[in-house]
Amino acid sequence: MKSQALIVAGIDIGAATAKAVLLNGNTMLSSCVIPTGESVALAAESVMRSTLDRTDLSLSEIDYIVATGYGRRAVTFAHEAITEISCHAKGANLLYPLAHTVVDIGGQDSKVIEIDEKGNIVNFAMNDKCAAGTGRFLEVMARVLNAEIEEIGSLSLKGDDPCQISNTCTVFAESEMISLRAEGKSRENILAGIHSAMAHRIAIMGNPIGFKSQIIFTGGVARNIGMKKALQDRIGEEITVADNPQIIGALGAAIIAAKKQGHSI
């Protein structure tokens, strides 16, 4: 029997991970994060199925589904596809009503988004042409330095003499890392330099917009404590890491789905 309550879903298919959120009114029923893998279409199906499996609902009971992320067009069962910038704005606003800036760093792009008190976009800047300033950049650097991606943030905080990284192009930076290691530089100091260089790039991208408090950090890279500190040091403002930062885009997509059905959250 179909539930009488409005149930909506948001699905965010990113380069590295696929995320889904189920909402019933103001209540989050379920959420899930999985690796995207090679097929965005299969990732969409898998993350939706896993999210539904945590409830007693079926896909047919979902009133409206909004897809977002770079793979949003591959979500064939979604009713609508919407840019991830709008979705991150709405998701951050729901959790942090005082937020004015969202910094989102994902696997293949990074964004600085200025929002108003209703979560509407005022302005934004985006890097989607180069791996520098993205999670992919950090993954490559972690591999070169023989470190797990989950540990590079904490390792960077142990650096007492951060290396000056002159290249933020992934290809040239990889060669630079090898040279620094050959010079005897520690992984900690190299990683501290990498995080600082990446924060500098994000700051340059966002400076024309401005970093207005409250600043919310979303995306997979927000889980990296070294990146949070590097950004705070660079822009000189406190940054709040969103609760479960990877699902903010999917949450925003679900909020928009509810609005499409005439329900404001």
Image (tube, rainbow, N blue to C red):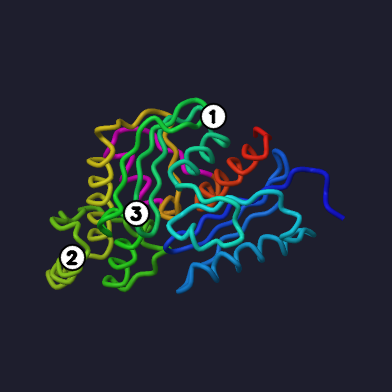
- 251 relative to 6 in the view: left or right: left
Q: Quadrant of residue 124?
A: top left
Label ID, residue 109: 3
Please report the bounds of the magenta region as a residue range. 225-242
Q: Earlier in the sequence, mark 3 or mark 1?
A: 1
Circles 1 and 2: CB distance less than 8 Å?
Answer: no
37 vs 149, left or right, is right
Task: Report the residue at 47% width, 31% height from top.
Answer: 120
C-alpha separation, residue under disc 1 versus residue under disc 2 = 44 Å
Say what amino acid the circle numbered 3 marks. Answer: Asp
For discs 1 and 2, the disc positioned in front in the rendered view: 1
Closer mark to the observer between disc 3 and disc 1: 3
Q: Amino acid at mark 2?
A: Lys
Assess whether residue 142 is covered by the magenta stretch: no
Name the disc covering residue 185, or none.
2
Q: Main secondary structure of the magenta part?
A: helix
Q: Position of residue 80 (x, y in %)?
A: 56, 50
Position of the N terminus by quadrant: bottom right
Q: x, y percentage for residue 61?
A: 76, 55
Check disc 3 and report its element: helix, strand or loop. Answer: loop
At x 26%, y 65%, the residue is 187
Task: Pick whichever of labels 1 and 2 is earlier in the sequence.
Answer: 1
Q: Nearer the viewer, residue 115 or 168?
A: 115
Q: In the displayed structure, would residue 147 be above or below residue 85?
A: below
Q: Earlier in the sequence, mark 3 or mark 2?
A: 3
Q: Quadrant of the C terminus?
A: top right
Element on which disc 2 rests: loop
- Residue drawn 15% across the image and 54% down it: 164
Q: Residues within 10 Å of mark 1 (few under 14, many from 20)?
A: some
Between the residue at mark 3 and the residue at mark 1, the CA separation in whole angstroms equals: 25 Å
> How many marks do you count on the picture?
3
Residue holding disc 1: 97
